[in-house]
Structures are given as C-alpha cells and as structure tokens.
Image (tube, rainbow, N blue to C red):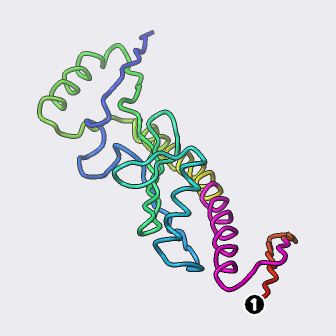
Amino acid sequence: MSRSYSIRIPIEVLIPKGTGLSEGSFSMVFTMLEILSPERMKELLTRQLLEKGYNQSENGLAMPLKSGKSAVLDPDTMTMQLKVPMPESCAVYVQEEYLKQFKENLKQAMETGKVMAVPGVENKIEQMKQDAAYQLKQLAVEARKDVNLALKEVYREAIREKAASIGNVENVSETKEGNTYRIRIEISA
C-alpha cells in the first residue's frame, strides 16, 4: 500500500497568468442625492465615514478591515472597490509512486512560469474561487450597510442645513415606518 504526501503548490503554477486570480474583486456604485452642492455633500459624507473609523487613502476612504481585504470608497465617483486576497498556495495529495515525477513537473513549471496540469486540483481551485466570492459577498453586505447608514446621517444633516438656509427652523420631527424614514421640518420665513 502506498502512502500519499501533502504538497503545497504555489497558485501561480496552477492558474494561468492574466486570469486575475491573485485576488477577488468587485465594485459597487452608490447614489447620493444632491440636497446641497455636490462638494458639500461629499464633504459631509467624508466626515461621516471618517467618524465611523474609515481612513483617508490615496484611492479614497478605506473601510477598516483585516486579513488583506480592502473596501475603498471614492467620494468623487461614489464607487467602492472591494478586494479579497486569494491563497498563495494549494495543498494536494500525491501518491508515493508519483511523487518523484510530480516534484519534477512542479520544479519545471516554476522555472518556466508555465501552468502545471494537476489532476484533482481543479476542484480545489474552484473551491478557492467560491470562498473568495463568498467573502466578497459578505464584505459587500457589510460595506453597503456601513455606507448607507452614513448616507442617512448625511441626508439628515443636509436637509437641516438646507432648511436653515430657507428660513428659521421651528420644529424638526423624524419618523420611521418599515423601510421609510421621514424628516419633517417646519420653517417660518
């Protein structure tokens, strides 16, 4: 009876270059109502997200995340780029009688930069893709919730500013029914 050995294979010899599988990525577009000038609305949103713990980066406002994930909102385009890293290697099991040939094929693939055809690895790569897609989905849900809550606060503040520019604000009331949120402002001229 032969033994099988677990060998870690670098992803670059399993997936062709240019397929973009070093990371999973996704982008979401948000809409922002223009209650005030676009510059003021962006300013309010930026302030709100920074207060929530986002960080200013060269690409926009970065959501605080761990483990190589990233979610960055560009306030100019209102587009958020989400990224999840793929694993750098994949473990495969090789029977003892094929071990020597397998190691030679792996060495040759790494030296030449070519893709190595490994039976049974396709399923593992597909699983890694599915894991990345699941992580992206979870990240998208969390990011959308975060930005939508920030937008709600921005709208609240923008409506109050707009009302104050029209006249004296006499009364402000807020109600929520299901998914509908209402702000009623009474102004005296």
Q: Position of residue 161 (x, y in %)?
A: 65, 74
Q: Nearer the viewer, residue 86 or 98?
A: 86
Left or right of 166 on screen, residue 106: left
Any magenta on residue 75?
no
Q: Position of residue 187 (x, y in %)?
A: 78, 84
Residue lying at 42% horizontally and 15% vertically, measured from the top left: 4
Q: Position of residue 24 (x, y in %)?
A: 42, 49
Mark 1 lies on a secondary structure that is loop
Q: Is residue 157 above or below residue 123?
A: below
For the N terminus, give its image quadrant: top left
Q: Is residue 48 above or below residue 110?
A: below
Mark 1, residue position = 189
For the C terminus, give its image quadrant: bottom right
Q: Position of residue 123 (x, y in %)?
A: 46, 41
The part of the chain drawn in magenta is 146-173
Determine crowd level at label 1: few under 14, some 14-19, many 20+ residues with C-alpha closer than 10 A: few
Is most of the magenta stretch helix, strand or loop? helix
Left or right of 168 on screen, residue 103: left
Q: Nearer the viewer, residue 35 or 69?
A: 35
Q: Nearer the viewer, residue 138 or 47?
A: 47
Residue lying at 77% horizontally and 78% vertically, measured from the top left: 169
Tell me which corner region of the image, top left, top right, bottom left or bottom right, holds residue 103. Answer: top left
Left or right of 175 on screen, residue 158: left
Any magenta on residue 164?
yes
The amino acid on which the numbered mark 1 sits, given as a three-letter code, is Ala
Q: Nearer the viewer, residue 31 or 84?
A: 31
